[in-house]
Amino acid sequence: MTNQCRTLSVSIARSAEQAYDFLSVPENFPRWASGLAGSLRRVDGEWVAETPNGPMKVRFSERNAFGVLDHWLSAQPGVEIYIPMRVIANGGGCELVFTLFRLPGMTDEKFAADAEWVMRDLAAAKRVLEEP
């Protein structure tokens, strides 16, 4: 069985390489990812974020040549939320693409609110990356 999902994206007037170089650094996430903006710190070799839902462990994909920015949030042991994200070249700029999965039991309203939240974060990434 699959979960419903939405693909959300924003065009950024920076090369894919420049965008990836910034977005792949966990320490930069608080500058644009509001869900992780409370704090993101290393604790005993793991990343921990203070989120609106409390502290969560965060795993990031290894740096790669493919623009993959996937990350995983752990609200509790054994439960991870997969967050696929990509930087894709588009001419001299790029697309930042985020796949939002609807979690089991999530209401239509919550899924829509999460999509709006993601779009705000993507717009914030665009603003930060396009600053002179």
Image (tube, rainbow, N blue to C red):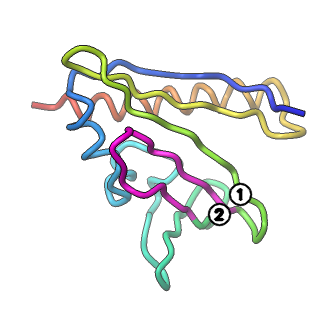
Q: With respect to residue 95, does 31 lie above or below? A: below
Q: Which residue is mark 1?
A: 80
Q: Amino acid at mark 1?
A: Glu
Image quarter in which the C terminus is found: top left
Question: Relative to the observer, which residue lies in front, 76 or 82?
Answer: 82
Residue interval drawn in magenta: 58-74
Q: Amino acid at mark 2?
A: Gly
Neighbour class for label 2 at 10 Å: few (<14), some, many (≥20)? Answer: few
Mark 1 nearby-residue class (10 Å; few <14, some 14–19, many ≥20): some
Tell me which residue sits at (55%, 62%) in the image.
58
Q: Position of residue 82 (x, y in %)?
A: 65, 47
Image quarter in which the N terminus is found: top right
Disc 2/disc 1 C-alpha distance (Å): 14 Å
x, y (%) of residue 45?
Answer: 46, 81
User: Of the residues tagged 2 and 1, which is closer to the observer?
Assistant: 1
Q: Which residue is mark 2?
A: 54
Q: Nearer the viewer, residue 74 or 15?
A: 15
Q: Secondary structure at mark 1?
A: strand
